[in-house]
Amino acid sequence: MFSVDLLLDALVAGILLGGFYAAVSLGITLAFGLLDVVNIAHPAFVILGSYATYVVNSRFGLDPIVAGVAFMPAFFLLGVAVYRVYHTCFERRGDESLRGLVFFFGIIFIIEVALLLQYGVDYRSVHAAYVGETVQVGPIGIALRLGIPCAVALALTLGLHLFLGRTFYGRAVRAVAQDALALRLMGANPVRIKDLAFGLAIATASLAGALLIMIGPVEPSIGREYIGRVFAIAVLGGMGSIGGTLVAALILGVLESLTSTFYGPSWALAVSFGILLLVLALRPAGLFGR
């Protein structure tokens, strides 16, 4: 039954969920939007980040957010290594369109199988004092398991936006997507710049994974649910636009929340693919695309 309070709760939950979606989608915006690398395995790296957080939280009691940040350097190096293999075997030879896509499909299955063999199919979760708490703001209750991930995601989005816009390496990342030859003439190595950017994209997956397992339990194959979402957000926001990614994530989060509240959660995932198809058909450049 429709009510104003129910609508407000759905809107707030959608905004908080959208903030989290932005954190998950930033890596796709970097890799796909700026580097033209169709890394469909990004959600699998997010799940890997969730399990890394689960391990240190369950064994040492480390706060999930601290764990996500602590693993970012390791995920950065992992991203650099993955891109080196991708560039050497596929991109340099001009085979990135199809064979490169199969490469990332392979990474998905390797991560899933490794997690299944190690941890099984049981759902895993983390513990923190604030995970089960709720803050009441007037008639609206804000679950901290959603509110804190949203705040962290906004900080990550802002930090990445400032890095790309105000630092030399950030501007070089934007430049390599526009004119790699001009960048080379300026004395920069486009491959190394892509190393940095792809490593940064995978580093965001570490923190996004920590936020994911705070919101709810995870299992190895749950990352598949996010493939459609992250690409829908990246395309809707405009390829390579960090601000656009945030706006698109908030839109998708609100639409999914409203759909789940009034029509049932089984329809929520269809919203992501529906938006992706509509954007590709009506405005391929996205909301903030050039």
Image: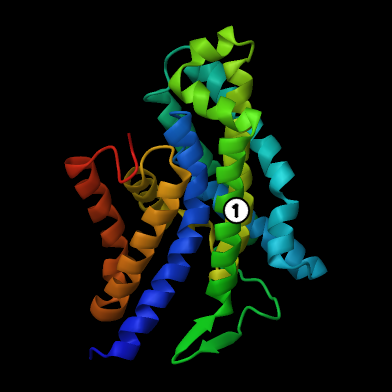
* Quarter where residue 185 is shown: top right
The reply, left or right, for residue 272 in relation to residue 218 is left
Q: Quadrant of the C terminus?
A: top left
Placement of 268 over or under 169, stated as above or below? below
Residue sitting nearer the eye, 108 or 131: 131
Q: Position of residue 200 (x, y in %)?
A: 62, 39
The reply, left or right, for residue 58 in relation to residue 173 is right
Residue sitting nearer the eye, 191 or 171: 171
* Quarter where residue 282 is shown: top left
Please tell me whether mark 1 sits on a helix, a strand or a loop. Answer: helix
Q: Position of residue 104 (x, y in %)?
A: 48, 35
Q: Quadrant of the N terminus?
A: bottom left
Identify the residue under disc 1.
156
* Quarter where residue 197 is shown: top right
Q: For the point 33% across and 38% down, which residue is it? A: 289
Q: Position of residue 258 (x, y in %)?
A: 30, 74
Pointer 1: residues within 10 angstroms few (<14), some, or many (20+)?
some
Placement of 162 over or under 102, stated as above or below? below
Q: For the point 69% across and 63% down, which residue is it? A: 65
